[in-house]
Image (cartoon, coloured by chain):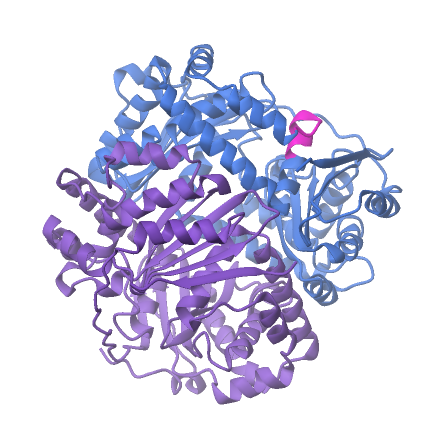
Chain colours: A blue, B purple
Amino acid sequence: MAQEVYHHTFANGLTLLAERMEHVRSAALNFLVPAGCVHDPQGQLGTASLLAEMITRGAGARDSRELSLALDGLGLDRDESVGPMHIRFWGATLARNLPAALEIYADILRRPHLPADDLDAVQALALQDLQGLEDEPRQKVFLELRRRHFPAPLGRDRRGTPEGIEAVTLESLRAQHARLFQPRGTILSVAGNVEWGPLRDQVGRLFDDWKARDQAPLALERPVGGQAHLPKETEQTQIVIAYPSVPFGHTDYYAAQGAVHVLSGGMGARLFTEVREKRGLCYSVSASYQTFKEVAAIICYAGTRSERAQETLDVTLQELLRLQDGVEQEEVERVQAGLKSSLIMQEESTSARAGALASDWYYLGRVRSLDEIQAAVQALSPQRIVEHLRRFPPRDFTVVTLGPKPLQLRPEVNGKVTAAAG
Amino acid sequence: MAQEVYHHTFANGLTLLAERMEHVRSAALNFLVPAGCVHDPQGQLGTASLLAEMITRGAGARDSRELSLALDGLGLDRDESVGPMHIRFWGATLARNLPAALEIYADILRRPHLPADDLDAVQALALQDLQGLEDEPRQKVFLELRRRHFPAPLGRDRRGTPEGIEAVTLESLRAQHARLFQPRGTILSVAGNVEWGPLRDQVGRLFDDWKARDQAPLALERPVGGQAHLPKETEQTQIVIAYPSVPFGHTDYYAAQGAVHVLSGGMGARLFTEVREKRGLCYSVSASYQTFKEVAAIICYAGTRSERAQETLDVTLQELLRLQDGVEQEEVERVQAGLKSSLIMQEESTSARAGALASDWYYLGRVRSLDEIQAAVQALSPQRIVEHLRRFPPRDFTVVTLGPKPLQLRPEVNGKVTAAAG
């Protein structure tokens, strides 16, 4: 199947991307609005999350109830989520309902009511969400890792702080909306059974009088890094480890993906085999890649019973360091097969394609074709992965644990941990 | 698109189902083997989970490592999971790799090595999985609810007990495999770009000399029911409520689905609106339907800060009871739009279709066409839903809470809770 991908950037900066998938009946849409929690005012951490919750409570000519019914009436499966950089609006439904959905989203993005009466309830929800974290040790340890490892404000949690949430007022929410909801940097991607011409015309009509604003560039702080332990009387000890990798778009990007998939993903992956299968050290162990435009990291996780936590940490770190000693051809073939197969799966899902279009555009300013990705995966080899690992060896680790007892780093690793800056 | 669904039951009882989706390149497979945890021997609870973990550690001519590499080398995204009734083997990959995957699954199901050397590690993992529950209050409260609400052994947790896991021996695992892994009651469903003739021939060749065995019918105990509180010093109080519904296949099934979707799913749903949006009582609130062949239940969940837990419980129960007073036309239209849209999404996913084929066959002994489901959804009306609710009003509640303090049931509800049997 040849891919049909379209792109238009309107004069005000809004980017529209579309992929026509003519054999499906659905369509998915994905708005990335550059209003993520990195933009929360310092004394009002949690603003983006409050805004994402308030913004669907009435917009344009519809009050909150009418808006809910209108969206549900289109059969729209939908979600609003707050990331560091963006508030994301995702929806999927029958392709024939897409134009009606876009009309409503234009109201939500541009003409939300942000009703005063709802603010108390929304703040109460946000406080609950934050408080619920205390009962989720796994999430908690990940948040602390991101906070320490990434240069602030990139590692910020969308949930904010109790003081921040309480300090938000209706006026500050409105100001945040006016400042950040704007076409420059906003990406709308659509995938499914759509016609490009009518789609572009409709989006133009809905959005081309939306006013652009300048946005101040983000100032990044030096990461905290280091090793930290969060004491808690849990049954299991949670371990997370991060180290720098190359960002999406870097020439080493595919080699970095190859390396992380040698470690994790599939039964034959090293962490699964060495930590879980052979030693039975922990039920869950994994590594994943997380990127920003400026920086990226490999993040490893293991949750284990406390008496085996030290051994789990040691073995996991040893596997990370051992990677640069060499990778087998059969491991690369395993990784290639998995990546190619997941590419085919993605190609068949309107939501996955809409997400990939927007993500490619945000990071690269263009959309990669499936052929291009396939060729890059095909070009992976043990040598390329090992050369990448020698250029970017695992070091500058940030290590966070949560459980009854702190863990020790072995001497050969200790020197590779960043000195904690704060 | 006309659906192309095929079915063949082999002489030994194995059922093969397939749906041809010619516009995709992937295929998904789904084995349901009637070896779920309801069959765990009483002194060895956890057996099915141990077996599911052991069964991929070498099979046929391949040792554990070779098997991992062979499956990963096919680009197979896969998972083995243990439910009450079945062990499920799911996989998805390129359609052209499906025959090779089926060859390997025939080894796994029929000729697993169950290697003695791995048992200690597998038992250690199972104990960790069980122990990890203590740090997951939400999962914990659901498990206790299912245990109390469903007639034993249906409500059993796959994780078993520490004593049960430790009591399992290699001999007992082998006996369990020999007893339960058999063609009678096993369903293999496949969806994707597959050809029926060659598929049926291959499955016949791989499985038609598999010997059928009788299986004793399951004896169900009287449910425990009642109200229970699990004391724990958590930040949030977890609340779960169950009440009986009609099983999948019952003439009231679609009306029951309609009722649960009036309560939950979409912004306009009653629990979301009343409990979360208007009152800000809790971040998460939902209702879902769970079925066995014999019995089914609606299960509601809310997680909330402890000082608002009593109000959350009261409001949630009130919404459940209020449903039989009437349902609006616009609520039914909302539900219909959502159900139709999710049907279209399912139609485009090989994994979703493979899952639906197997599930329909297990519960109904036939596969429903998408047209049939669509017509049934279209026939929903306020009157049908309310009549269903009057025939099957919410009562015989089981209520389980977890948190620092127990909650009270209001008098009008208290009479509707089953007397705890144990």
When the figure is inspected, residue A203 is found, relative to residue A148, above or below; the finding is below
When the figure is inspected, residue A391 is found, relative to residue B420, above or below; the finding is above
x and y, in percent, of residue B399 in the image: 37, 73
B208 with respect to B346 (left or right): left
Q: How many marks?
A: 0
The boundaries of the magenta stretch are: A359-368
* Front-lying residue, B416 or A19: A19
x and y, in percent, of residue B16 in the image: 41, 59
When the figure is inspected, residue A68 is found, relative to residue A284, above or below; the finding is below
Q: Quadrant of the C terminus of chain A?
A: top left
x and y, in percent, of residue A222 in the image: 53, 20
Instruction: Residue at 65% x, 31% y: name it.
Output: A360
B117 with respect to B268 (left or right): left
Predominant secondary structure, magenta span: helix
* Front-lying residue, A403 or A350: A350
Q: Is residue A360 magenta?
A: yes
B272 with respect to B175 (left or right): right
When the figure is inspected, residue B299 is found, relative to residue A313, above or below; the finding is below
* Front-lying residue, B20 or A382: B20
B387 with respect to A205 (left or right): left
Instruction: Residue at 62% x, 47% y: name it.
Output: B23
Q: Is residue A378 visible?
A: yes
x and y, in percent, of residue A239 in the image: 34, 35
Instruction: Residue at 46% x, 38% y: name it.
Output: A143
Q: Is residue A330 magenta?
A: no
Instruction: Residue at 53% x, 39% y: name it.
Output: A157
